[in-house]
Image: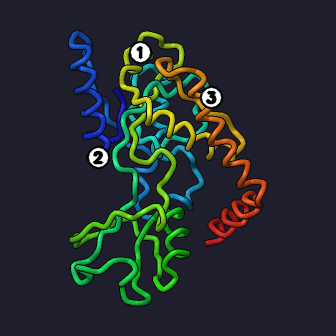
Amino acid sequence: MGTRKSQLARIQTDSVADTLKELYPDVHLEIVAMSTIGDKILDTALSKIGEKSLFTKELENALERNEVDIVVHSLKDLPTSLPPGFTIGAILQRENPHDAVVLHPKNAGLTLDSLPEKSVIGTSSLRRAAQLKKRFPQLEFENIVSCTFLLRLWILSPDDCMYAVGQGALAVEVRAQDKDILEMVSVLHHPDTVLRCISERAFLKQLECVHVGVTANNISSSALEAAEKLGMDLANALLNKGAKDILTTARKLNDAR
């Protein structure tokens, strides 16, 4: 099993491994941790790097070389287009996907609505900054890749900030031709999460004009197709209302920053 070296990635992968060990006690599982491009670049906002596989490329290279048989990802980090020969073999039950804000002790008891004007919000996420700037124009936003003095955590509602595609769910990536591995990990699928995430990834893929890749043999093909169609239809509705021009402008502005 391949995973990133970060503490969170190891915790997530250990949880998947523990579940598989309970289901398949005779199967030997070894966890191989490695650093990815995204783990090594700590001083630049990820949106500025221009690489879509920041947290997955090294893991997928190991999968291609047969050095690992299973890779565990945070689904939101997994590009909507997988390399040829790979597929998502399982999507696990989603945890709370909503974004959160951590406040400095001096702002204890406050919310984003009540923070003093021109308070600085740190985030390395272009998605979060764009939504929160619109919702809270009185605040200022800066690219910050780490925070200290954590005191109180606020969960943001979708009205304040919509979470990322696939956020809160784990994905298990495998080689598409490894039928035994596919069958083994398929029991990890959480049907409701699978359908929700397929819709979300189809939405994002349609905006990028590419195709979805999830293998879920234990979920009816009609449900999978309906989920993908829902995401595509929503993306097309936005494209018809001018979303392409907005996205093009946003990318140019981001590149110019």
What residue is pinned by disc 1?
181
Visible residue check, residue 154: yes
Q: Distance between the residues labelled 2 and 1?
A: 24 Å
Mark 1 lies on a secondary structure that is: helix
Amino acid of disc 3: Glu
Q: Which residue is drawn at 48% across and 13% down?
A: 178
- Which numbered disc covers residue 252? none
Inspect the image, locate mark 2, and give the three-letter code of the amino acid beneath it: Leu
Which residue is the site of mark 2? 8
In the foreground, 30 or 77: 77
Marks 3 and 1 sit apart, C-alpha to C-alpha, by 24 Å
Report crowding for label 2: few under 14, some 14 to 19, many 20 or more residues within 10 A (C-alpha).
few
> Horizontal and vertical percent for residue 96?
35, 50
**Quadrant occupied by the C terminus:** bottom right
Seen in the image, is 252 located left or right of residue 12?
right
Mark 1 nearby-residue class (10 Å; few <14, some 14–19, many ≥20):
some
Q: Could you tell me how far apart the alpha carbons at marks 3 and 2 are, in whole angstroms?
A: 33 Å
